[in-house]
DNA sequence: TGTGGCATATACCGATTGGTATAGTGAATG
DNA sequence: CATTCACTATACCAATCGGTATATGCCACA
């Protein structure tokens, strides 16, 4: 019918793999299942990706790196801590709400971040985790003057903020409210004694 | 030599399974590997546990339920919010530091809490997660008078506190400092503006 | 018309998966 | 002595695992 019946098999494999890795986890999904659901055969999959693990790496590159760029852009604006924290949170929910694909990617990322230390999932994700942690760390050190003497508690602040953000987004998988995020940031900065 | 060369195969299987589930994850570990490392054969494993999933459930019961009891005991003392939050945090690190087995159990638990929604890991853990969340929720509602009008933000508080705690303990897998936990609780209650 | 390379499928590999049918232990009980 | 019971091992099952050798269809270019 249309002049474009051509299918991008590589794209299909990537998207199908994300769906399955998100839903069942990397270790629980077979290569055969991915190929079948993507409408290709196994050799086709192995033509584009050198191994199952290589496929996982490509899925990550295809999804998470866009998120990382947005995150990096949001950090170095130099408009103060409060502004930065809220902007960062906004990047998170905007990314997740932008598409179902992004939502799946983010939660796959989260699940991999907490995955067992000797698993392939963990190995594939660790560099991204490290980058993001450093990014949060820099956010606090860059705004050190606002916080007075942090006494090297930047790491604790970074961990606390990432923990709050991650867990909130884990629990509220489908519906992320921007107002609630704002409230969360406020809580983080001023404590629960409103 | 000793009068007790008898081995408790059920115990060995349980402990070995925990080791492997912790390190590589439930889905990535084979029943054969568990049996071999435990020094038994597969039918012996299936004599004590009806399936691989049944084994996972038993591993959870064997480890996490002790933690849950300690947690429940720590909550309902009615000595105020600050006291409760610190006590709860203390239960976490005391449990983790008590033994290497406990440390593995806790991190397996954490990894399962963030595991993919359609995975067996998720299914096995969800009831415990729900119980713990309710427990945290009650902690805040029980101390409502201290916090003034929470406007139904108990859920947010519970999520925030669990998130901070979990992420801190994930990152500091091996070395959990009680003083740092104290500082973390303080940060949670009064915000990062010291 | 040929030729080379990208992209795809058929059919297969050895190894491992979760799980079991069956037979045997050794110790206690009648 | 015979039976029973808790427990363990040998040997096996079909199915699936990740991965590949080989052949072919197709299209661009010569």
Image (tube, coloured by chain):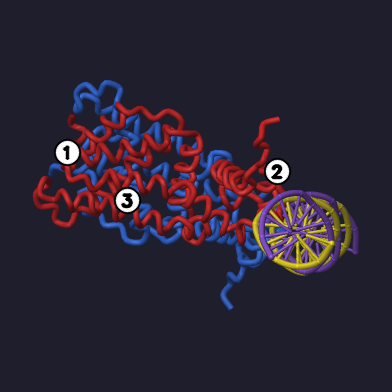
Chain colours: A blue, B red, C purple, D yellow
The residue indicated by pointer 3 is: A168
Which label was assigned to residue B159?
A: none
SS label for mark 3: helix
Same chain for the residues at labels 2 and 3, yes or no? no
- Pinpoint residue A23: horizontal percent, then vertical percent: 51, 60
C-beta proximity under 8 Å, tags 2 and 1: no
Rounded to the nearest angstrom, the CA distance separating label 1 from label 3 is 18 Å
Q: Chain of mark 2?
A: B
Q: Is residue B95 visible?
A: yes
Badge 1 crowding class, 10 Å Cα cut-off, few under 14, some 14 to 19, many 20 or more, is: some
Residue B114 vertical position relative to residue A123 in the rendered view, above or below = below
- Residue B176's place in the image compared with D28, above or below, is above
- The residue beneath circle 1 is A190
Which circle, 2 or 1, is nearer the viewer?
2
Image point 48% across, 43% down: which residue?
Answer: B105
Quadrant of the image containing the C terminus of chain A:
top left
- Between A92 and A163, the one lying in front of the other is A163
At 29% from the left and 41% from the top, the residue drawn is: B88
Front in this rendered view, residue B138 or A12: B138
Residue at mark 1: chain: A
Q: CA distance from mark 2 to mark 1?
A: 55 Å
Give the labeled residue for mark 2: B39
Do the residues marked 2 and 1 share a common chain? Answer: no
Tell me which chain the residue with mark 3 is part of.
A
Q: Quadrant of residue A76?
A: top left
Which is more N-terminal, label 3 or label 1?
Answer: 3
Residue A48 in view, yes or no: no
């Amino acid at each position: 019918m249309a002049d474009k019946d051509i299918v991008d098999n590589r794209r299909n494999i990537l998207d199908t793999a994300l769906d399955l890795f998100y839903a069942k986890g990397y270790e629980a999904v077979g290569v055969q299942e991915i190929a079948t659901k993507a409408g290709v055969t196994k050799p086709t999959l192995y033509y584009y990706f050198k191994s199952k693990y290589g496929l996982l790496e490509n899925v990550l590159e295809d999804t998470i790196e866009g998120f990382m760029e947005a995150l990096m852009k949001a950090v170095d604006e130099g408009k103060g801590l409060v502004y930065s924290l809220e902007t960062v949170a906004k990047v998170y929910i905007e990314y997740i709400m932008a598409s179902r694909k992004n939502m799946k990617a983010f939660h796959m990322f989260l699940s991999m971040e907490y995955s067992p230390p000797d698993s392939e999932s963990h190995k594939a994700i660790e560099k991204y985790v490290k980058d993001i942690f450093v990014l949060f760390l820099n956010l606090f050190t860059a705004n050190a003057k606002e916080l007075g003497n942090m006494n090297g508690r930047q790491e604790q602040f970074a961990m606390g903020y990432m923990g709050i953000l991650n867990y909130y987004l884990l629990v509220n998988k489908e519906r992320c409210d921007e107002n609630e995020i704002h409230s969360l940031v406020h809580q983080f900065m001023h404590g629960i004694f409103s």
